[in-house]
Image (cartoon, rainbow, N blue to C red):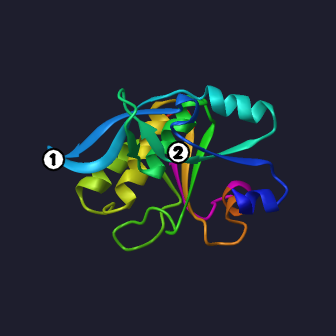
Amino acid sequence: VSMVNELGVKAVGISGKDGQLLRCDKKLSNGQDIGFVGDIKEVNPKILFDLLEKDFLPIICPIGFDDNCQSYNINADTVAAAVAASVEAEKLILLTDVEGIKDKDGNVIAEIHKNEIYEMIHDGSISGGMIPKVLGCLESIDGGVTGAHIIDGRIPHCLLLEIFTKTGIGTLIKSDKY
């Protein structure tokens, strides 16, 4: 938030508990309790619209709450995807520390249709920390987002390079509407 404010943007840090933004349920992994980790159940974007209307940029800490007001940590990529769908965003862009989705030979895939993602997870091409990223992208697309980009945020001007160049620098996951 401080870095964004230093750039001259009026940023406000909020958590998913603020304004009842992120309601969640306790997440289990293979039926096992994994602590205070949550799965998003509902996004209420009203606070986001209110802040944006007043020219504030909301920066969301991925903490949600359940029906008993218990706090839970939620995967940040999952939160970004759910928020994108809830505000009916045209695009979702995940700034990461990886170049994008790679094929079996290690080459970055510039564009991929959403239907190809599950096959890549099944064959092991997509694994580890990339799985929640791509599943979040698919959820956002199922929620109405047209395209989801996974790009390397370590590259200077990465957003401009992704949006304003023909092939971009990361991976674009396309919906049927794209």
Look at mark 2 in the image and give the residue it sits on.
Answer: 80
Which residue is drawn at the image coordinates 73% and 44% (left, top)? 57
Which residue is drawn at the image coordinates 49% and 69% (left, top)? 98
* Quadrant where the image shows the C terminus: top right
Of residues 135 and 68, the one nearer the viewer is 68
| Residue 36, magenta (yes or no) | no
Determine if residue 145 is in view: no
* Quadrant where the image shows the N terminus: bottom right
Of residues 70 and 34, the one nearer the viewer is 70
Taking 31 as reference, is 153 above or below it?
below
Circle 2: element type: helix
Measured as percent of width and height from the top left, residue 165 is found at 71, 60
Furthest residue toward right: 8
Q: Which residues are magenta?
A: 163-174
Task: For marks 2 and 1, give the CA distance.
Answer: 24 Å
Circle 1: element type: loop
Look at mark 1 in the image and give the residue it sits on.
Answer: 30
